[in-house]
Amino acid sequence: MAEFFANIPKIKYEGPQSTNPLAFKYYNPDEVIGGKTMKEQLRFALSWWHTMGGDGTDMFGCGTTDKTWGEASPEARAKAKVDAAFEIMDKLSIDYFCYHDRDISPEYGSLKETNEKFDELIDYIAEKMKADPSKKLLWGTAKCFDHPRYMHGAGTSPSADVFAYAAAQIKKAIDSTIKLGGKGYVFWGGREGYETLLNTNMGLELDNMARLMKMAVEYARSKGYDGDFYIEPKPKEPTKHQYDFDTATVIGFLRKYGLDKDFKMNIEANHATLAQHTFQHELRVARDNGFFGSIDANQGDPLLGWDTDQFPTNAYDATLCMYEVIKAGGFTNGGLNFDAKARRGSYTLDDIFYSYIAGMDTFALGLRAAYKLIEDGRVDKFVDDRYASWNTGIGKDIIDGKVGFEELEKYALEKGEVTDSLTSGRQEYLESVLNQIMFTL
Ligand code: XLS
Ligand code: NI
Ligand code: NI
């Protein structure tokens, strides 16, 4: 089999002093941190769409990177993509991958033909996984948003035929996920939203989206699937208003429709910032509500208002992310999927390696710093102390449900102005503690 990256060696850990661009400075896969190897904790995944298919095309220009993998026909190209993906994963020590059905194999003349060709590719991937059992599917999904039939949505389309088509497509994508032993299936509501309420029955659309998800769960469970389903929130793009706006909105939706037992969150950093939240905020909302699942690791640009899907290089955000992951008990079925693409100007195929190394090292730094932050204990202790008034006295009585408005009025009248349980928030001090920890790794 052809080697696609003959000039790229297997990437090794050389430590923070190394200046070798093709080496990890912080990611040392087998190093044990917090009782588990970095590899087990971080569960990095390759995103098939960006890495194998994204060629830099944007609305102002054509692609800058050749992602044809040396093949002209769609069938041969799809196969070459698999070979190249496994070579990339091997050289980067990435164990997981994620895909949309159409990243693996495109649409052909009919759904029947599309399905047959897709199945062949899934079989081919299964063979590759048999040959190298370290390679695993993190999650699968269906691309129910790019074909013109999905212009008004898939599960939320006004057309029942489109809903049926989407169901058929999702059924197949679930089959492939099960076949490859995946423990995650993602719903990202590509065009599940609206442009104007003048033409939209929002209530029916949301009911239908829940119907589609319920059917997906029922079908997958009937086939023995015991993994997680994820919703990946995003507030806008491509539609003006995406229904899965943010984690809090999605949790409300899942609870309303009784889907909360089967679904968790796949949180993407760039989607969090599009919703005017921090990445950490979204993770915290998921964790506090028991919906922490998986992560699409990328970053946006503070000056741009769209999903730039940049490789994550912000170690500060990665530290706060990994802090949440550790506090949530770590990943179970989820992981860190690099839903990220090299900039259009970083156009050589070698840039795939430079960008993954940058992203992986950033999260390795984040993991190291997050553990240090927790071991150091100053921040956690500060938070505990800040809420100390809830551990005894009136605070405890409120939590225990022993008092109501009458008792609280009496207490406040007797006590007079509040003084002793009001303390400084000390934000600047805490931020400096975080800096100190991050820069004395
Ligand atoms: C797009 C989403 C998408 C999902 C998978 O903004 O991030 O790539 O992760 O459908
Ligand atoms: Ni994503
Ligand atoms: Ni995205």
Image: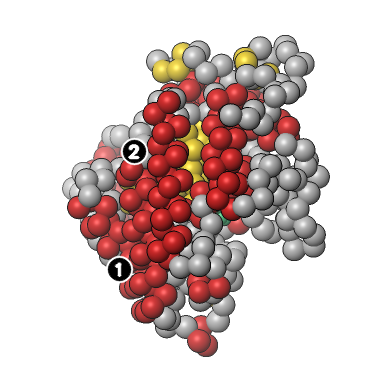
Q: Is residue 135 left or right of residue 82?
A: left
Q: Which residue is mark 1?
A: 211
Which kind of residue does numbered mark 2 sit on? Answer: Gly
Q: Which residue is mark 2?
A: 181
Q: Quadrant of the N terminus?
A: top right
Residue at 22 percent of width and 49 percent of height: 223
Please identify the quarter of the rendering in which residue 134 is found: top left
Position above or below: 25 against 204? above
Alpha-carbon span between mark 2 and mark 1: 25 Å
Q: Position of residue 285 (x, y in %)?
A: 43, 48
Residue at 45 percent of width and 38 percent of height: 125
Closer-to-camera residue (108/272): 108
Position above or below: 399 against 256? above
Position above or below: 331 against 101? above
Closer-to-camera residue (85/250): 85
Sequence-first disc among 2 and 1: 2
- Residue 19 visible somewhere in the drawing: yes
Q: Position of residue 419 (x, y in %)?
A: 46, 41
Q: Residues within 10 Å of mark 1 (few under 14, many from 20)?
A: some
Label 1: element kind: helix
Q: Position of residue 66 (x, y in %)?
A: 73, 45
Q: Is residue 88 left or right of residue 391?
A: right
Closer-to-camera residue (273/161): 161
Label 2: element kind: loop
Q: Quadrant of the C terminus?
A: top right
Which kind of residue does numbered mark 1 sit on? Answer: Arg
> Which mark lies nearer to you, 2 or 1?
2
Q: Position of residue 340 (x, y in %)?
A: 62, 44
